[in-house]
Image: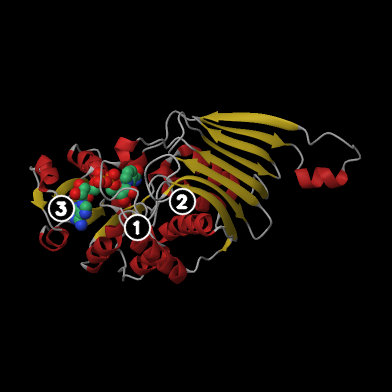
Amino acid sequence: MSNLRFGIIGVGTMGSVYAGLLREGKIAGAELGAVCDADTGRTDLWNSVAMYDRADLLINDSGVDVVIVATPHYDHVPLASAALDAGLHVVVDKPIAPTKRGAETLLQCDVQDGQIFAAMFNQRTDPRYIRLRDMIQSGELGRIQRINWIITDWFRSDAYYASGGWRATWKGEGGGVLLNQCPHQLDLWQWLFGMPARVRAFCGFGRYHNIEVEDDVTAYLEYADGGSGVFITTTGEAPGTNRLEIAADMGRVVVEGTTLQWIRNRTATAEWCKTTDKRFGAPETETTVETFENHGEQHAGILKNVVAAIRGEAELISPAIEGIHSVELANAMIYSGFQHETIDLPLDSNRYEEWIKSRIEASTR
Ligand SMILES: NC(=O)c1ccc[n+]([C@@H]2O[C@H](COP(=O)([O-])OP(=O)(O)OC[C@H]3O[C@@H](n4cnc5c(N)ncnc54)[C@H](O)[C@@H]3O)[C@@H](O)[C@H]2O)c1
């Protein structure tokens, strides 16, 4: 079977990683076929393959089988749509779009039988989260009462924000930490726990950096069954934390560092509460700690999975259609933080689109 040929649109920071994996033969059954960047200085680095300065040329003329879209976010929708319309398999980087309306537009594209449309949610390959998802989906953990995710290890300097004109503006990126760094955790959140019914967020816009978008967020998420969660993130704290803690009927789970710790209740909390005659105390517990050697195959794992899915040998780990949820959560948190109101989900994508247009018009950046 011949190798699938990949074309990459946008060979900046991330596109170069994908190009490197493919050129170095790290993705079995695949090879780098073409690269495209609006900045020709970027494509020159990959001069062993076809190079383009316009995406439409790569899509229509290069003969690649798969396109990876790794440009700034606003171009994800038009470029991924064009590649899908040309009948190519597509991997779009996160976020699939900066706004829910953009994601809806992208997901309206016709995708033919056998045509693969994936998103780069590489953290879905992390064995800690895969294990946690199994625990939730098998019912082992019981009803989830509370989720706490402190994900503040996304520190970024002023030099980072100065490194691309598109970064951290409403027009160039459509948001800050929630649209650039946190699509991973917001995707994992919905992948693990599903979508909440409403969101109330408190956002600092340019709290730590000279930027107009959010770089500090504390969000409260409420579920239809009464469960709740708190999501805390920033690019302004160092050192940061990445700690996911879940309180469920069958105990407490903490995912942090290389471990997943489960302090497991021998009796479900709700049952113990109703049946015990003790006034104090709590269910007996036993603790297990699972240690994982690494965080999985990440980007290479998603690309290998895309190859396998195209060959009909695997289900997609990260279908693009699921990418709308992390965009919706990010939009809802930003909107809530800006307007100081609780946002019921599903988010009204027209209302949000109007609002972000007004932010872009009011921007002086
Ligand atoms: N999955 C991940 O782990 C991960 C990590 C970082 C960034 N990303 C995503 O990758 C995307 C790019 O981020 P980055 O940090 O690599 O940005 P970057 O600025 O380093 O690179 C973007 C590149 O796209 C090129 N470009 C812009 N518009 C183009 C167009 N219309 N046609 C062709 N080329 C174009 C630019 O010249 C630049 O070289 C973002 O959407 C970001 O969210 C994903």
Q: Report whether 224 appears left or right of 267.
A: left
Residue that carries the numbered disc 2 in the rendered image: 187
Could you say whether the residue bearing mark 2 is in a helix, strand or loop? helix
Task: Assess disc 2: are there few (<14), some (14-19) or many (≥20) residues with their C-alpha within 10 Å of its C-alpha.
Answer: many
Residue at x 31% of width, y 48% of height: 167
Q: Residue 258, percent across and down?
A: 49, 29
| Tag 1: amino acid | Ser
Q: Report whether 19 appears left or right of 333.
A: left
Vertical comparison of 22 with 196: above or below: above
Mark with earlier residue (1, 2) = 2
The one of 68 and 232 positioned closer to us in this rendering? 232
Confirm whether residue 138 shows in the render. Answer: no
In contact (CB < 8 Å): disc 3 and disc 1: no
Task: Assess disc 3: are there few (<14), some (14-19) or many (≥20) residues with their C-alpha within 10 Å of its C-alpha.
Answer: some
In contact (CB < 8 Å): disc 1 and disc 2: no
Mark with earlier residue (3, 1) = 3
- Quote the CA–CA distance across marks 3 and 1: 25 Å
- Quote the CA–CA distance across marks 3 and 2: 29 Å
Residue that carries the numbered disc 3 in the rendered image: 38
| Tag 2: amino acid | Asp
Residue that carries the numbered disc 1 in the rendered image: 363
Report whether the residue tagged 3 is closer than 8 Å to ligand 1: yes
